[in-house]
Amino acid sequence: MFNRKPNHSQLLRVAKATIFISLLLAGSSRLHAQTATDRSESERSDKLTGGHIETADFEPNQPDIRLTLNVPSFRLTLWQNSKEVKSYYVGVGMKAYPIYIGEREATEVIWNPAWIPPDSDWVSSHKGVRPGEVIKASDPRNPLGKIKIPLGNSYLIHQAAGTNDVGNLVSHGCVRVLRSDLYDLAEKIIAARAVPISSKRIEAAKHSFKTLYAKLDDPLPVDIKYDTLVVEGGVLHIYADVYDRGLNRAASLRAELLSSGVDVSKLDDKTIKKMLSQITRRTQFVVDTRSIEQGRALEEGQLLPLIPKKQKAVGRKQ
């Protein structure tokens, strides 16, 4: 056989195929990068919401609900039909026992749950408790309180011990919610999913130690994020890096602002470092992105309490 040179039309087809494959691969890379970014972004980020979060009153029998939590802001939010219904301030896992970051699912809500202590050195701080022991709801050694919402792999949403839990690292990898807020959240989940459990049975569970199970036919998505730098509604929020992941750096903040379309030409590293240095475990630095673009980030930025002093839950009144 003889080797014949490809003609012009063949070369053109090869060139087009090569360009197509290159564009496909480039698009795939951008999609992969964007997906990775979305996983780390707060659910409140302008990059995900378009700069506006719609709110709405809760509606029973509307099953499209989900929960999100951004750990550094200690804010758990219930969404229905992609609109914010209510947010609650919470406590989360200690640095040595951090809450899982990523997507989880809840398949049930349990009133008056038993507690089975995990095989962990954390259990040693509880006197008279052994790993694997079943501790009933009526037992004062049980730290779960009136409700738990399992998230799989021993991670839970459950009752806080008190107001001091809110905004703090307090648990063994769990989310702690004040009892009144947890009652509210649980009842909204039940009503949204039309779980066949009467309000009478729920009230009875509140005033007894009898265990009540509410199974969810479809899992409730729970998305847990870890985002210390959030541009929300055109405002930059800087939260403490509570798990010391090294995220609050000048380069990271600059990249976050750039990716949100903010002009950082008047923002130098010295200013950024001053902004970052002001934050404590109980505060957040807040500044309008327009102030950043005008070179007035420090002058017009504010150091605000992480948890509003007169408010343990935020959202629309029900």
Image: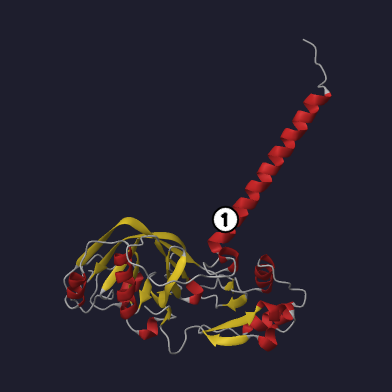
205 in relation to 297, above or below: above
Quarter assignment of residue 51: bottom right
Image coordinates of residue 215 in percent, x first then y, are 26, 59
Helix, strand or loop under label 1: helix
Q: Nearer the viewer, residue 121 or 192?
A: 192
At label 1, the amino acid type is Thr
Work out which residue is located at the far top of the displayed protein and give it.
Answer: 1
Image coordinates of residue 309 in percent, x first then y, are 45, 89
Q: Seen in the image, is 150 located left or right of residue 237?
A: left
Image coordinates of residue 176 in percent, x first then y, are 36, 75
107 in relation to 263, above or below: above
Quarter that holds the C terminus: bottom left
The reply to whether residue 131 is in sight is: no
155 in relation to 170, above or below: above
Quarter assignment of residue 189: bottom left
At x 71%, y 41%, the residue is 22
At x 32%, y 62%, the residue is 61
The reply to whether residue 202 is in sight is: yes
Quarter that holds the N terminus: top right
Q: Nearer the viewer, residue 71 or 205?
A: 205
At x 72%, y 84%, the residue is 296
**Which residue, given by chain and number where applicable, does mark 1 sit on?**
35
